[in-house]
Image (cartoon, rainbow, N blue to C red):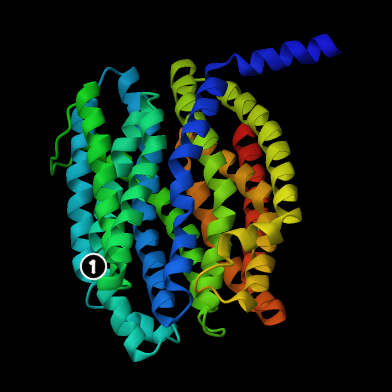
Amino acid sequence: MRNSFSSYYQNIINTNLFKDTLKTTIWSIFGRSFGLLIPFFLASWFGINSKMDAFFYVYSITLLIATIFSSVLEALIVPFIQEINAKKGDISSFIGRIFGNVSLGIFVLLILLFPIIKPILKLITQFNKNDLDLIQKLFVEISPFILLMIWTSIISGVHYAYKKFMLPALSPAFRAFTLLLVMLIFKNRYGIHSIVLGYVAAEFIRFIILAFSLYRSKLIKLNLAIKFDTNFFIFVKTAFFSMISLVAVQSNILVDKTMASWLETGSVSILHYAERLYMIPITFISAGILKTTLSHWSENYYISNSFDILCKALKKAKKYIFSFCLLTSLILICFHKIIIKIALQRGEFPIDRIPEVGLTLVFYLIGFSPLMLSQLYVRGFLVLKKTKIMMKCSIYSILINIFSNFLFMNLIGIAGIALSTTFVSIFSLLYYQKKFKQVMAK
């Protein structure tokens, strides 16, 4: 039995997927470590107040819009490039049309959003007039970040398709360093606006680095073209359901912060800080395994055209991800008080609010394993381009999240919103498992 286990273990670690995942995870740990420190610098430099609530709300809206497009583009570009490459098609023209058409669409969307954001938020939040004025101003200032993040995701997707994982994994370090430097220089002069300036400058630096890398590699020719053809429309059709899915998923974040604004002042900030701590293990794991599996699974699927190979790969990944995530979440829950004190007990952060952050973090961590397993299923559906399943799950999830938020926040306060998030993660996993079995049966 020992020899059998040793042989199986060796087979795992000698695969290209394992090697790429390990290297990408290490690069991502280094690349994203600086970024994960940002909320704690914000806590120390700016504390908890109505202006920070306004900024975090604007950042949630911005991240919602950017992530809807950037995550879909970065992920779907990978299987499409693999398919085009297998058919000996023109990848450069395809990417150029993605750049041009998406950029035009985002520009129009932002122009339409600028005048209506304040009236909408006046209806659904409890922010006062001064805070709403600040939110509108901050949104206009941070809007270039949205377009830059989308451009960066397109270039990252091309890198991943060609299994160039290192620079996209490291690039968040350049972004985080730039952001912290800009905030440090301008925080006394521009206050809360220095954070926005930092995010825009930082994403611009990240885009330039990745674009120059792609130019030097000569994998494709970078261009920008506003042109619609059959291949682009197929991409849009496939992406549509995935975007609706992400709208629902990311809307849950905005829903959480909106409902948190109904509680006492500082609740939005507390939820944000707990969420950022929760994102540390998620970021490190997803930046490795979720990037490499999509690339390798897509290549293997389109070369072999075998659904069985994809099923076996998913089953194997689930086994190891579940064990690792469960162990990680248990360790973090046991030491969450120490983690909270190290991260937040300094500067302007009020000590009496630390227990609230701790309890919120614990409820987030309970849902760590189901969240990561559900994301493996998402990668499988992306390879198969069955994004309609993802859309349906996400719509159900946002409805469940709203209901459970009402229930749990009235019972245990701000931590109830984190418990609701965990409840949604469990539902998503069960839903994806059921649907994948149905796809297998066909």
Q: Is residue 404 visible?
A: no
Could you tell me which secondary element the residue under label 1 belongs to? helix
> In the rendered view of the protein, which quadrant contains the N terminus?
top right
Query: Considering only vertical position in the picture, is 178 above or below 10?
Result: below
Query: Considering only vertical position in the picture, is 261 above or below 337?
Result: below
Viewer-proximal residue, 290 or 225?
290
Question: Based on the displayed image, in which of its 4 quarters is residue 107 positioned?
Answer: bottom left
Q: x and y percent of residue 240 in the render? A: 37, 50
Q: Residue at x 53, y 28 (%)?
A: 21
Viewer-proximal residue, 360 or 85?
360
Query: Considering only vertical position in the picture, is 176 above or below 126?
Result: above
Judged left or right of residue 279, residue 355 is right
Residue projecting furthest to the bottom: 129
Pointer 1: residues within 10 angstroms few (<14), some, or many (20+)?
A: some
> In the rendered view of the protein, which quadrant contains the C terminus?
top right
Q: Which residue is mark 1?
A: 141
Q: x and y percent of residue 420 in the render? A: 65, 66
Amino acid type shown at disc 1: Glu
Q: Residue at x 63, y 55 (%)?
A: 425
